[in-house]
Image (spheres, rainbow, N blue to C red):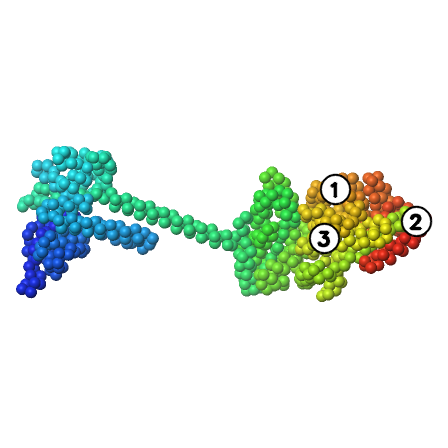
Amino acid sequence: MGYNGNYLSAYAYRKIIVDQEGNPIDYEYIEANEAFKILIRSKTDEDPFDGINFYGNVALTGKAATTEYYSDALERWFRVEVYSPKKEYFVTLCIDITSFKQTEFELIDKNELLGQLYEEVTATEEELRQQMDDLNQAAQLLTESKTRLKRAQKIAHVGNWEFDLETKTVWISEEAFNLYGLIMEKHELSLKLVQQRVHFEDRSRMDEALELLIQGESEYNVNFRIIRADNFEERHMHSIAEVVCNSSGMPVKILGVIQDVTEQMIYERDLKNKNRELMKLHEELRENEQRISHMAYYDYITDLPNRILFLDKLKEAITIAKKNGTNVIVVFLDLDNFKIVNDTLGHTIGDALLIETAKRLLTCIDSKDTAARLSGDEFALLIEDVKPENSIVPNLERIKLIFKEPFWINETMINLTSSIGVSIYPDNGETGEELLNNADTAMYKAKELGKNGYQFFDIKMKENLLKKTTIERLLRKALKNNEFVLHYQPQYVAKTGRIRGFEALIRWNSPEIGFLSPMEFIPIAEESGLIIEIGEWVLNTASSVCKKFQDRFGHELIMAVNISPIQLRQRKFRGTVLKAIKSSGLKPTSLELEVTESIFIDSYDNVANELKNLKDLGVRIALDDFGTGYSSLSYLRKLPISLLKIDKAFVQEIDSLNPYNELTKSIISLVHKLNIETIAEGVETLEQLNYLINAKCDHLQGYYLGKPEPEDLVGDIIEKAAGKSSSYEAVE
């Protein structure tokens, strides 16, 4: 009879045989069950584990022992439990653990990937060992082989069963009764009783497997579900069996074992779930790594390459161009007035505008070229492998063209332009950083020239940029080192010739680079934000000087101070003005703030309200350089101004032969109808003076009347004016 199953119930009861010195040399059988005999017959040896010393040690010392054994003949694993009920006697319990070992091997393989589950597996093994120890301790108290078998089956949740093929009767062990939730004393055993406990979905599969076993076509190794009779709980079972044949080779009986594997299946299911979770986490980690890698080289708003990737591609392009003798073009773009879009329409629309700009830029380049967003509203284009004889101008015109059509963002129309700088390899640089910086420099030149255009880099731009950088650096310490001074140019009342006041004009004589005109350093101060601090110093100083000379000479003087648009847009500007007035003791009506027309263009309402509030407090507001900017006469009536300053460009055109003289006179007349005073600057000749007096201009200022002087000469100017006659006599 061949071995075709898995026995967890094979045992033998034996006695050790010792020599004269008490050393174990053999053993004899007291009893052994059928399963153990089947195991013995499968081997050429007498015993599945022939360890005389191993058995002798247990029988003579009374210490139980456990080992695992693999049968090459049966190709199965066994756990061998040995204990001694009394000296020189020992019980061997062979438990078929092949399925457990297979599961263990699978777990080991999985644990190589799931190291964190190792402790759980180890804990499970410890629980199994503890169960075996409990089984050994219980078995030591048993004296009858049947009781020992029952105990072993109960601990292992294993029952055995027999099915007589001739009588069609079934027998199951006490533990098998327990597994089905049946009570031996209550339930009359029958095949139908057992089959009723099997889940209805699994019955046909079990019947088919049993039939194939009887026919010798397949082994019986079945997993199925039962519904316990006592609590109707669904449990998972595993059963294996073999056929017993008579002397004629005809099947007469089936011997099998059944084991509750619910916990094992739950464990394996949980393990699979954890494995799936781990794989999911691994996939998420991989996706996150890809996302992070993408974010490292691509702009998160437009998904264009960022500065890092752009410079990498630029480096590669330079290498190719050097080899081929071609050019590389770097185009640097900055969106004009983009900050206004963000400030007025919000960053959501601003971001959408950046995305649409990126899409349009991509239409301007070939697939081999690169468009990138460097930062904020700055973009760059890389045009590779350009032949020296090819012009880049058509590309630049194409870029300008994409801004000709308005952008529509959330049903909002936005008109946008860009300032563009261009650098060319190898003429304008040998490295990517140098080319990009030089293109940036050219872009700033395009902005200086009025925006919405492009400029090619030349070395003078770099020199100018270096000078600009130097000026900005020196500006940061000029105020702290008291390098600024104010000069004061007198203003006169046209009718009387009496002094009206002064315009405060800043001067800077740097110890390092010498004298600089305001036209050289004020734009840099505005761009860097230093104008806020410098402007506050001018306000405080000019107000104090005005108050000083008012007190000295005992009559009112007006101090005119130029205000930068940057200052006026500061929330604390009104507070800065009031602080200067309060600290100097100057009346608000003695302070005149000069602003240019351009200050109203970008944010008319805010600026107009701020100036109106100051005017309501008594501060005078003058509109400087009228006629050179954007204002019309109809626009003037909306502005909260007290005085209009006629630009020197108009004044210098005045002569007896100029037909446009009447235009200046008309402007003065119309402004008066708006209840606004006028002052003409740049008066440099007697003819200009007389004409402006006859044109009824209210106030005059210019080198003919007095140039800007330092504070220590202001007193002389006031005294000299006081000594003049009461009025100018107009020259006809």
Q: Position of residue 2 (x, y in %)?
A: 11, 49
| Residue bearing mark 1 | 612
Instruction: Judge whether residue 628 can be spotted in this image.
Output: no
The residue mark sitting in front, 3 or 1, is 3
Q: Residue at x 43, y 50 (%)?
A: 287
Amino acid type for the residue under numbered disc 2? Ser
Q: Residue at x 54, y 63 (%)?
A: 319
Q: CA distance from mark 3 to mark 2?
A: 36 Å
Tell me where residue 388 sits by quadrant. bottom right
Residue that mark 3 sits on = 536
Query: Dot 2, how many residues are within 10 Å of its Cα: few (below 14), some (14-19), or many (20+)?
Result: few
Q: Amino acid at mark 1?
A: Lys
Q: Which residue is mark 2?
A: 727
- Give the residue type that dot 3 points to: Glu
- Answer left or right for 533 relative to 214: right
310 or 608: nearer the eye?
608
Q: Secondary structure at mark 1?
A: helix
In the rendering, at what x and y percent does residue 246 appear?
A: 6, 44
Q: Nearer the viewer, residue 465 or 104?
A: 104
| Mark with earlier residue (3, 2) | 3
